[in-house]
Image: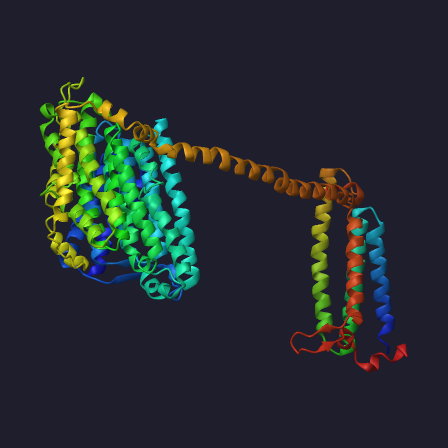
Amino acid sequence: MSLYPTLWAAFLMFSLGLFGVLSRRHLVAIIMGIELMFNASNLALVTIGWAYGVITGQIIALFAIAITVSEVAVGLALFLLVERVRKTVYADETNLMKG
Amino acid sequence: MFDPQTLLLSVLLPPFISFALNGLIPPLRKSKYAAALAIFSVFISTLASLILLIKRPGGELIFEWIPAKLFSPFLFGFFLDPFSIVMFFIVSLVALIVQVYSLGYMSEENPSGLGRYYTFHSLFAFSMLGFVASSSLLQIYIFWELVGLCSYLLIGFWYYKPEASRAAVKAFWVTRFGDVGFAIGMVILWGATGTFFLSELFVKAPELPTAYLSLCMLLIFFGAMGKSAQFPLHVWLPDAMEGPTPVSALIHAATMVVAGVYLVIRLFPLFQFTPEVLSFVIWIGSITALIGAALALIQEDIKRILAYSTVSQIGYMMAVAGAGAKSIAFFHLFTHAFFKALLFLAAGSIIHAISTNNIWQMGRLSKRMPQTTILFLIGALALSGIFPFSGHFSKDEILVWMHVKGFRIHFFILLFTAFLTALYMFRTFFIVFMGDKEAKQHPHESPWVMTLPMWILGLLALIAGFPKESLFKFLGHDSESYHSYIAYLPLSVSILGIMTAWSIYQMKLFKPSNVAEALSPITSALEKKLWLDDIYEWFYRGILDGLAYLCGWFDRYIVDGIVNATSWYIKQASSQLREIQTGRIQDYLYGIIAALLLLIWLSLGVFPVKDRINEEIVKPKDHIQAPSQYLEGEK
């Protein structure tokens, strides 16, 4: 069996996630894009680990999933705070860093 | 416990500890214990230097203060040789006497001012003691500057008096002017030989070309000229009399101003290879002796008379040191320290009693202040060189040496100076202590805390000349006795000078103003202090101010211009650059992704990288080859 279909799928997922992150204004949508990118990389890890016949790729993927969950939790909490303070959930309206 | 190292440290450290404690703990400095601490510390130094004088150890002690493989700037060395041991004794003893005397003289000062005074005194004692023992040129320079600093601080002790602060700045300026020469000469010497240590310099420096060495020694002698108030850099010393009188006695008569002579004595093994510089030293010394005495003759301020007299006496020392007799110069330094300090303290006693410096406002003080009169007379006789007072022996030695070694012109200049010395000293004596008009104030004899130190100095001024032979033996100088008519000349001219003063100022055989008119060109020149101050002022206003203006212009428009232009451009550029800081998170993400893609593209082996471990050029592509059986679908 070839490695490439799965890797292509991971690539597509990654690109899709990236597109989501770059194009959406809503903070939750952005974090959904990020999740998609994470999952793409997890898929690639599992695939390549399988291809090399080692279990390391799966282990790392499991770790990555766990970390992703906590990261999402923190991210959502931050967004709630942003919403409460800035009264907005849109990324382009939270531009305190504008020079 | 009497090994040389302990003794040396117990000479040097107590004043420093006193300075540090008084300087760092304001409550102590403002209390009456500050003076007690300072006096006690210098008393320990005196005891230790007395033991050194009895035990007479020799050698050089070297301390390392930064371990740097014997690299000479990080070593401190101290000589324990006859010169430094005798100098320890002079400095600590006179400092002790003067500090005790100051208790009486400065009694009207408030406690915090007195604490400041004694703090500076302790620092001075430490730096002067350190200076005399230093065995490296760099270290000499450090202590040299420290004593200069103390001199500045103590001249300007009454800093709220404008004359005092001006005099302090002037003293600092003029000595600094000489010190620049010292610093340059020292560094050139170091550059040529690679060492600051005197013992190594004495070996290495004579191998240098004579012209080169002469230049160094001439520059170093400039430093000595500034510090020892030699013509034409003597102008600061008379003004330095604005400081408290005990300070004048200690710093500007007995110890610090002779530092220049001491430097010439110390570096004599180098000076002896440069005969041109030595003859310059003799000339400067003789001229200074003459001019100082002539200027002392027309002064009306008792302290200024003594200041010019100091200038003149240091001229003697310089002249004879230049003529090759460092031991005789040192002997005169030794006796001079006592009798000149005595004269200053006696003058201080008068000033304390009637609070004026002008000799014409004094008169008939012998009735009111008998002790001071006797002490001043002892000092004046010693200074004039009358047998058996100490000055007689040293001045005799100087004149005999100058005559025997064939310095005829200098001999006559110095002989005439001896006449002038007796004349101005007894002019002062007759006007101040005899005279026919009474002082307006009601003078009173000073308290015992002032007279006792003076009596000790008076005793020393009387007997300091007698240990001549043993001192010369200790210093390693084979004194030859010349029983010729020359030996009686100095004494005769001194007596002649006293007689002249007596006939003019006591018997009024002829009026001083008539003499002054007869010599009007000379007197008017002297009254203008030989126009030296005017020349310096012209130099300062005309040349230095112009130079400073030019430098200021350059700094303001060229240097500042470059700096301001740079900052202006950066400001402009940054106001353009701020446009790209949009604050939108996606814009930054675009940048990050672009950079990431660039890195990936680079890592695909466009540019080969060097493996730093295996030292071979590798293409990153080689590393990411997966096992081949999974790659077949691509083919």
Task: Describe the colour scheme in one phrase.
Answer: rainbow
**Residue B356 location, x and y as percent?**
23, 24
Name the one closer to the observer, B376 or B395. Answer: B395
Q: Is residue B625 visible?
A: yes
Using the image as rendered, state which of residue B115 and residue B604 is in the foreground: B115
Give B294 or B383, whichever is nearer the viewer.
B294
- Res. B127 in view: no
Q: Quadrant of residue B52?
A: bottom left
> Residue reaching furthest bottom?
B629
The relative height of residue B445 versus residue B614 in the rendered view (above or below) is above
Name the one closer to the observer, A74 or A3. A3
x then y, percent, for residue B475: 19, 57
B417 w.r.t. B588: above or below: above
From the viewer's perspective, is B266 left or right of B455? right
Q: Is residue B354 above or below residue A9?
A: above
Which quadrant of the figure contains the C terminus of chain B? bottom right
Q: Quadrant of the N terminus of chain B?
A: bottom left
Quadrant in which residue B391 is drawn: top left
So how many labels did they put on this image? 0
**Which x, y percent locates residue B172?**
37, 39
Question: Which residue is depicted at the point 12% across and 34% down?
Answer: B377
Residue A64 x/y as whole percent: 71, 63
Depicted B268 relative to depicted B382: above or below: below
Residue that extends furthest to the right in the rendered view of this protein: B635
